[in-house]
Amino acid sequence: MQEDNTRSGVWFVLMAAVLWGTTGTSQAFAPAGFDPMVIGTLRLALGGGAMLLMVVLRSGTSQLRGWPLKATLVAAVFTALYQACFFAGVAKTGVAVGTIVGIGSAPVAGGVLGYLFRNERPGRPWFVATALAICGCVVLTLSSGGDVSIDPVGVALAIGAGISYAAYTLVIKGLLEKHEPDAVIAVIFCIGALMLAPLLIGRDIAWLAAPRSIAVILHLGLVTAALAYWFFVRGLQRVQVATAVTLSLAEPLTAGLLGFLVLGEHLNPLSFAGIGLIFSGLAVLTFVGRSVPDTSAEFGG
């Protein structure tokens, strides 16, 4: 029974990561001049709002009471920090380095934080899978070619994004022990969007009036946020923090394949090698890995 529960959790997280992988393809259809920070904030607001509406319609406001202040605010802060750090890091040091550092640092941070705060001990399959998947991300990203620039501030911001993703995954894992999954995402996303809202002051939002912009925002908010996290939190209930973060590396794999199939982007042999490495790492966790029983306490209770 425990093995079946873990296996279903793996598939839930993978489905979430596949939906996250459509983000880049969706943004490719946005009109010229779109602002990634505006998109990131609206994605949280729309996704959180949709989940909040679903929670209220289903059970009223009863699930919105009794939240631990510390853990809730910490989760919201790290959710907002991920959006801000990732977009700023990519802008400073480029897509290649920003993506490698941001995505590659998240599984390592997830493993460390899960061990320190929840006493989770990832097994050998996790180490093998994480190494394969991170190498695959490096190969896949660098295969796009072009000039690679290293900006220390950009690298620091990308590392901050990876740590933030692992940290909010950790805190959400604790909140799921006492609150319903949909309510957790609704509350965290709405608070995170409010925290990011001041960053929108003075930004150009005229491009949002275009029909394509509306379609992109709706897809990002309802599909890559609300629906994806509906899957993610249900998977996170069943697997360790480290496992969930590593499985999320299915996102760049999906993005690469969609770029090839939908956007007509060229994939060279090195690109396929990177995709193969990521897929191999995910296969190790999906079909070989086992999650140890989680006996840890809630973070920040």
Image (cartoon, rainbow, N blue to C red):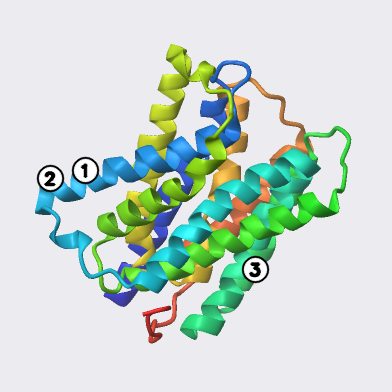
Please tell me which residue lies in front, 28 or 54. Answer: 54
Q: Amino acid at mark 3?
A: Val
Question: Which residue has dot 3 on it?
Answer: 108
Does label 3 or label 1 sit earlier along the sequence?
1
Please tell me which residue lies in front, 127 or 151. Answer: 151
Pinpoint residue 101: horizontal percent, then vertical percent: 73, 54
- Please give left or right for residue 65 compared with residue 71 in the image: left
Dot 3, crowdedness within 10 Å: few (<14), some or many (≥20)? many
Tag 2 near tag 1, CB within 8 Å: yes
How far, Cα to Cα, is label 3 from label 1? 35 Å
Please tell me which residue lies in front, 102 or 247. Answer: 102
Pinpoint residue 105: horizontal percent, then vertical percent: 68, 61
Q: Residue at point 63% right, 58% down?
A: 162
Tag 3 near tag 2, CB within 8 Å: no
Give the vertical position of 293 relative to 246 (above or below). below
Does label 3 or label 2 sit earlier along the sequence?
2
Q: Residue at point 44% right, 75% down?
A: 291
Q: Amino acid at mark 2?
A: Leu
Question: Which residue has dot 2 on it?
Answer: 57
How far, Cα to Cα, is label 3 from label 2? 39 Å
Q: Which mark is residue 53?
A: 1
Label 3 residue SS: helix
| Quadrant assignment for the C terminus | bottom left
Q: Nearer the viewer, mark 3 or mark 2?
A: 2
Q: Quadrant of residue 27?
A: top right
Give the vertical position of 14 relative to 109 (above or below). above
